[in-house]
Image (cartoon, rainbow, N blue to C red):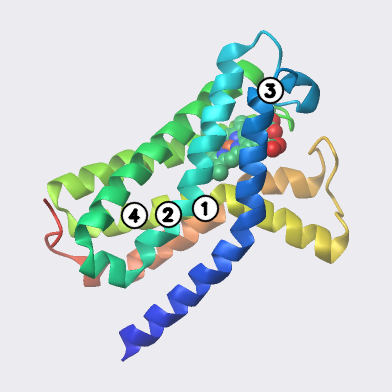
Amino acid sequence: MRFAKSGVAINALIAVFYLTLLPFVSHGFSMIRIGLSEDAALQSYLFTDEARVGNAAMMLHIFGGTLLVALVPLQLIRALRQRFNRFHRALGAVLIALALITGLSGMTYIPLRGTIGGPVMSAAFFLYGLCLFASALMLARMARIGNREGHWAWGLRLFWLALGSWLYRVHYTLWYLLTGGVGSEPDFSGPFDLVQNFAFFVPYLLAVQLWIIRKRSAHQGVLATIP
Ligand code: HEM
């Protein structure tokens, strides 16, 4: 009964999430369209003429990241995990590949082109990319060796990291709605911007870590779903 209630709550949250995701996905695909156009550099600062590697890395990054955010919540649906376990495993493999691609292309772009917010944003986003990349590798390893606790813990970390880019935009949207943008500057140099460089992933990772410490005893043993 408790499981059924929490399942309904998670499914309702996922439905709300997908509604908020629509503008996010449409922004991602319109950026890719710009990247593929003749005058990409005129339309967005993310692209530059004659910088093919950086431009390609950014388009791959946006493509992989948008799919990652759109697909990752499906792994939370208990009914899908239990009744369609093959689907859960196949989607898991796709998500790990998307996380590796998104992290790696972002970490390629940063040293080549930097970020709009300068060195602090570049360092923070690079750290975010490293966390996403490492979590994807660890999750793949835990699934492969059938470590149930490890799979659960790294899965949770990867889930929140995968949502990071969406959370970043949610933080900004709420802040602008509430305060009109106090402490935020167009070049991302305001105090709010500096905090946000880390606030979309570090606090979530810490909260997840506390959750893992509290609940880990319920997730011991061998993974029931190993191939
Ligand atoms: C997890 C899913 C992710 C999604 C959906 C995503 C999506 C995007 C999008 C749509 C943009 C273009 C922003 C704009 O229109 O101004 C962008 C920019 C960028 N992303 Fe990501 N991203 C993700 C993860 C990451 C990660 C892990 C890194 C770190 C390696 C990263 C680093 C960057 C950088 C450096 C930029 C350019 C920042 C700038 O100067 O404006 N992103 N991303």
Q: Is residue 49 above or below residue 159?
A: above
Q: Are marks 2 and 1 in contact (CB under 8 Å)?
A: yes
Nearer the camera: disc 3 or disc 1 = 3
From the image, tell me which residue sits under label 2: 72
- Rendered location of residue 19, percent (x, y): 60, 64
CA gap, disc 2 and disc 1 = 8 Å
Does the beta carbon at disc 4 come under 8 Å from ligand 1?
Answer: no
| Residue type pointed to by label 1 | Leu
If you read the primary sequence from the N terminus, does the residue marked by circle 2 or circle 1 appear first?
2
| Residue type pointed to by label 3 | Ser
Q: Is residue 44 above or below residue 125?
A: above
If you read the primary sequence from the N terminus, does the residue marked by circle 4 or circle 3 appear first?
3
Locate the N terminus by quadrant: bottom left
CA gap, disc 3 and disc 1 = 28 Å
Quarter location, residue 94 = top left
Quarter location, residue 49 = top right
From the image, tell me which residue sits under label 1: 163
Nearer the camera: disc 4 or disc 2 = 2
If you read the primary sequence from the N terminus, does the residue marked by circle 2 or circle 3 appear first?
3
- Rendered location of residue 61, percent (x, y): 53, 32
Identify the secondary structure beneath mark 2: helix
Q: Residues within 10 Å of mark 2 (few under 14, many from 20)?
A: some
Residue most extreme to the top: 50
Identify the secondary structure beneath mark 4: helix
| Residue type pointed to by label 2 | Val
CA gap, disc 1 and disc 4 = 12 Å
Q: Residue at x 63, y 62 (%)?
A: 20
From the image, tell me which residue sits under label 4: 155
From the image, tell me which residue sits under label 3: 37
| Residue type pointed to by label 4 | Gly
> In the figure, is residue 198 to the left or right of 65?
right
Identify the secondary structure beneath mark 3: loop
